[in-house]
Image (cartoon, helix red, strand yellow):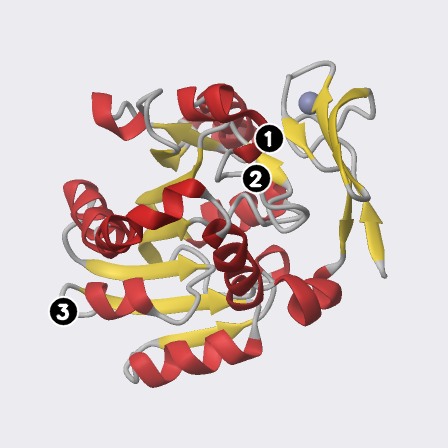
Amino acid sequence: MSMIDRQCPVCDSPERCTLMQVDRWALSQCSHCRMVYIPAVPDYQEHVDHFTWERSYARETQQRRKSPFYRFHPLLRFRKALPATVQLNWVMRHVRQGALLDIGCGGGEFLAQATPFFQVSGIELSPALAKAAQERTPTATIYQMPGASMSVPAGAFDVITMFSYLEHEVYPLQVLTHARDALRPEGILCIKVPNYASLNRRVRGSSWCGYRFPDHCNYFTPSTLRQLLHRAGLHPLPGRLHDCLLTSDNMYLAARRVTVPQEERLVSS
Ligand SMILES: [Zn+2]
């Protein structure tokens, strides 16, 4: 298997301790910034071949069927139907129209919902999902490429979304830096990731639903996600209480570009 060995994706420190070993995957914690991550992960091609969402979802469903919670599956299906609407409502609290880019757009489910309100574009690593996204949203511009090497017009987007994406990304800092450059000066970035600080993770231990080895390679808390955003030149915005509840497995965080005062720009140019 072709692998990439990473240092801390938030602060670049090589110092870490192992929290848990699952098969060949070592869940580790940075000794400096406390970021939890898997250092040795499959590269992009391995990811496309073995770990894209549509493949890992089938494995995950099989795994969940073994759980006693699965007998409540009609309820779980109902919960699963909610997020796309929740996500759109959340985005529209910040931006109500304009150009939208969804990074890690999957099969285009969110793009389809956003199309009546935004001019939509998407980035997706998996060729099969990128094709599905294009078929689902024919008016969208879909780029099939890794987020870390994305090539989109600079300063073109009013809003960039990343739903259940950044936890998969081997190079999250590069993606956030590209996203910052792709935003208009007043543009907003909207992120949803699993919350490693959630109460459920502490209670359920290694059975927590946020663990997926190795396709979830970054395990953010509100603190480590904010640190990473700052490093990418993005400023986290205050959210509502329910955007980041300890009782929820996921957290929502919005950010905007850090604007450099004009005097500083003149001095540095
Ligand atoms: Zn670190």
Point out the residue furthest to the top here: 32
Q: Position of residue 38 (x, y in %)?
A: 72, 37
Between marks 1 and 2, how big is the CA–CA gap? 7 Å
Between marks 1 and 3, how big is the CA–CA gap? 41 Å
Give SS at disc 3. loop
Between marks 2 and 3, how big is the CA–CA gap? 34 Å
Given this view, does label 2 or label 3 mark the residue nearer the observer?
2
Residue type, label 3: Pro
Residue type, label 2: Tyr
Looking at the image, residue 236 sits to the left or right of residue 78; the answer is right
Residue type, label 1: Ser
Q: Quadrant of ligand 1?
A: top right
Q: Position of residue 70 (x, y in %)?
A: 38, 48
Give the quadrant of the N terminus. bottom right
Label 1 vs 2, first from the N-terminus? 1
Whether the residue under disc 3 has CB within 8 Å of ligand 1: no
> Which residue, given by chain and number where applicable, does mark 3 sit on?
116
Label 2 vs 3, first from the N-terminus? 3
Looking at the image, residue 130 sits to the left or right of residue 81; the answer is right
Q: Is residue 22 above or below residue 106?
A: above
**CB under 8 Å between callouts 2 and 3?**
no
> Which residue, given by chain and number where applicable, does mark 1 sit on?
206
Give SS at disc 1. helix
Q: Is residue 262 above or below residue 169?
A: above
Marking on residue 211:
2
